[in-house]
Image (cartoon, helix red, strand yellow):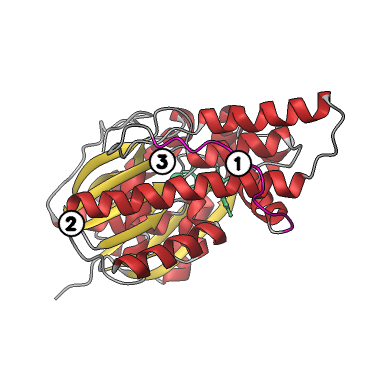
Amino acid sequence: EQRCWILGIETSCDETSAAVVEDGHRLLSNVISSQVKVHQRFGGVVPEVASRRHVERITWIIQEALDRARVRQQDLSAVAVTQGPGLVGALLIGVAAAKSLSFSQGIPLVGVHHIAGHIYASHLVKPLSFPLIALVVSGGHTELIHMEAHNRFERLGRTRDDAAGEAFDKVARVLELPYPGGPQIEALARKGRPVIDFPRAWLEPDSLDFSFSGLKSAVINWLHRARQQGRQINRADLAASFQAAVQDVLVEKAIRAARQTGVSNLVLAGGVSANTPLREALTQRCHQEGIDLRIPPLELCTDNAAMIAAAGTYRFKDGIRDNLDMNAEPNLPL
Ligand code: KG4
Ligand code: ZN
């Protein structure tokens, strides 16, 4: 049987990435150029700056991904690209690059949902087992997704306000820590203890939705009051307490989703799954509950094109194709 080589392209936020995946699961290359340093001095991602960086790098990154994989453009089976959601100007660069490659080589174009990509990151380590529940936690998303088979996504819950990663980034900001805040909070929390009882938003008794804006406000108010009263502030304890509150809700709701659906495969995905205490707490809970948990390695947790190529392969195999009039969709539904 002929090999399937898919080139993946990801430019939805602040990483420019291209990758080649063989037969949906074998990683041949995964080139990631992070813009974190560029955005750091602004304290967050600046959309115009991100687009410009993507333009400057995308051609070289694609060539590098092909070179490292030792695959020629003309040997590709298809090109898969993140169509959305994300920053529209950033997405457009990847979509334009994918379209021109598709046109010039006469190969199929496949648009991929960014969240689907995050879920398929696990597939690059070990084939996904269905049915599964995916907890996708990133800077833009906090979602619980039910999958019965490849390409079949059902959303069970989502955040009603801030994403989990966004909460980490905002709390880091009030603690005057650099962007992105997640790893900074995690490092600070390691030196503290979760002694402050911040609120956990459980919402309705069987709800699988999330809410993190109340927690963020509680942290800001706590800091404000402590400063007003001239109290000594233990930043490490504050970080540890915030992190514990996020972690408790994420773990509990993921388990709740598995129980409600009777599913025993859980996949953790997205940038926040790089968080060690979260990984450990979820691993322990899943062990107790008899749930098989998959967590991708760190480099596949944050945005990368390999996950897009993997997810794109199964769309390609199902005969899903996009035309050259495909557009970047900042609010693409799953
Ligand atoms: O998936 P990702 O790279 O980009 C989006 O699609 O949003 O996720 C980035 C998010 C940021 O909010 C960042 O603060 C968070 O993931 N993050 C973490 C950690 N590493 C990254 N949050 C908590 N702990 C970490 N170790
Ligand atoms: Zn992402």
| Residue at image location 32% in from the left, 54% down from the top | 255
| Residue at image location 21% in from the left, 46% down from the top | 153
Q: Does residue 104 show up?
A: no
Q: Quadrant of the C terminus?
A: top left
What residue did someone put label 3 on? 142
Residue 114 x %, y %: 36, 44
Q: Compare marks 3 and 1 and give the one earlier in the sequence.
A: 3
Asked whether disc 2 touches disc 1, contact meaning CB atoms under 8 Å apart, the reply is no
From the viewer's perspective, is the residue at label 3 or at label 1 nearer?
A: 1
Density class for disc 2 (Cα within 10 Å; few <14, some 14-19, many ≥20) is few
Q: Is residue 273 magenta?
A: no
Seen in the image, is 153 located left or right of residue 332?
left
Q: Quadrant of residue 142?
A: top left
Q: Is residue 194 magenta?
A: yes
Picture disc at residue 262: 2
Picture disc at residue 5: none
What residue did someone put label 1 on? 197
The segment highlighted magenta reads 191-202
Q: CA distance from mark 2 to mark 3?
A: 21 Å
> In the image, is the residue at mark 3 within 8 Å of ligand 1 by its beta carbon?
no
Residue 107 versus residue 332 in the image, above or below = below
Q: Does residue 118 show up?
A: yes
Amino acid found under the numbered disc labelled 1: Asp
Which is nearer the eye, 88 or 334?
A: 334
Residue 120 versus residue 199 in the image, above or below = below
Residue 331 x %, y %: 34, 28
Asked whether disc 2 touches disc 3, contact meaning CB atoms under 8 Å apart, the reply is no
Residue 93 x %, y %: 45, 37
